[in-house]
Amino acid sequence: MSETQPGPKSPAWKTCANNKVAKNRKRRAPLEYNNQCQQRFPDADRCGPPTSAKCRISVPRPQSPKNSILSSRRQATARGLAAYHIGSKMGRGNYGVVYKAEHLSTNTLVAIKCLRADPDGEGVPSTTLREISLLRDLKHPNIIRLRELICDGTKIFAIFDYAREDLSAHIRHHRTNEAGIGRQKSKVFLSQLLSALDYCHANRVMHRDLKPANILVTDGQLKLADFGLARTFTPGSSSALTHEVVTLWYRAPEILLGAGAYTSAVDMWSVGCIFSEMLFGKPLFPGQSELGELFLIFRAMGTPTETSWPGVKKLPHFQTIFPQWDARPATAIWKGLDCVCCDVLQKLLRCAPSARVTARQLCRHPLFGANENLTTALSGLDEPLRSVV
């Protein structure tokens, strides 16, 4: 036998008495490598260890399951990002940057939200995780769709449907003479917003940050977005909830007064503020502080009492020295508005949360005709209203 190829009785292939392979034993090549070796070296009876001069085929080291998973994830990430052509930057938020992009195979426009881990080393922000987990479960035509999620190290790329503008920009671009976007268009958008909220509340999800900037508009269709402050809730639960929710101008009075627990009625108050803003082109209660916001609400809707709002005096931030305002007539608050729209706003903007209308109840309001198609393209819009006090 050749000296360059150790045989079966070579010390390199001996085993120990306890049937364990000796430390100096070389690994045998797998069967598929033996076949390759037989084709290259017909005279060889078997394939020796990788160091053999007869066989030059190297045996790759098998990957551990953990390394294999990480490798496949990196390859999937590369393929995922490579499928998009990333364009201009659309905006920047507290936890990431949003880019406009195009899917190369379908030529579909999308929005890519690049999320970074917390620079303090605490990982991905809880608001980001909450938004992703909720949007993966919420499927509705008027809720922004999370198309894909790509993870790469400390970065998370969330792929959303593309929208041309948000409702705030839409109001700003389409209002005339400091007025709103018109009754008909406002009614269509309100119907779509109520449909999305009814779906969320039926699935026990509160949005808690409704405002025009968090509502997207594209091709006459409204889509609810930005679920960073959303959370699930249990009806009738008295669990304490945070007060650091909802932008000040759209914040319900129970949150301003420090209520320990609140319900999905906080979303309906925000809907009332948004509907008024669509009709008149400017915010209804633009307070500069929490106290200033409360006074603007009380001046228009009346200072609540134990009769109109049972238990209001027990709220932490309620003061008996608050000025006592009477509720103003709806026609004085929303000048020039018809009685049907005034009724909708009054039902939405009741200070007592238990008296506030729900999304499902409001969907059956006479404002929305039974034979009207409120999801089609908008045309023949009414003249916008011109004043709100």
Image (tube, grey):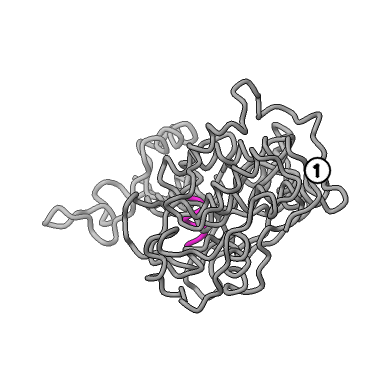
Asked whether residue 147 appears in the rendered view, the answer is no
Total residue callouts: 1
- Start-end of magenta stretch: 125-132
User: Quarter of the image containing the N terminus?
Assistant: top left
Tag 1's secondary structure? loop
Q: Position of residue 33 (x, y in %)?
A: 42, 38
Identify the residue at the far left of this view.
18
Q: Is residue 358 magenta?
A: no
At 66% from the left edge and 40% from the top edge, which residue is drawn? 339
Above/below status of 54 relative to 367: below
Identify the residue at the far right of this view.
177
Magenta span dominant secondary structure: helix
Q: Nearer the viewer, residue 359 or 365?
A: 365
Above/below status of 93 relative to 223: below
User: Quarter of the image containing the C terminus?
Assistant: bottom right
At 53% from the left edge and 65% from the top edge, which residue is drawn? 303
At 44% from the left edge and 37% from the top edge, which residue is drawn? 37
Above/below status of 358 relative to 260: above
Q: Nearer the viewer, residue 358 or 173?
A: 358
User: What amino acid is labelled 1 in the image?
Assistant: Pro
Q: Position of residue 351 (x, y in %)?
A: 50, 58
Q: Determine crowd level at label 1: few under 14, some 14-19, many 20+ residues with C-alpha closer than 10 A.
A: many
At 14% from the left edge and 52% from the top edge, which residue is drawn? 19
Q: Position of residue 20 (x, y in %)?
A: 18, 55
The residue carrying mark 1 is: 384
Decide if residue 17 is on the left or right side of residue 268: left
Decide if residue 83 is on the left or right side of residue 181: left
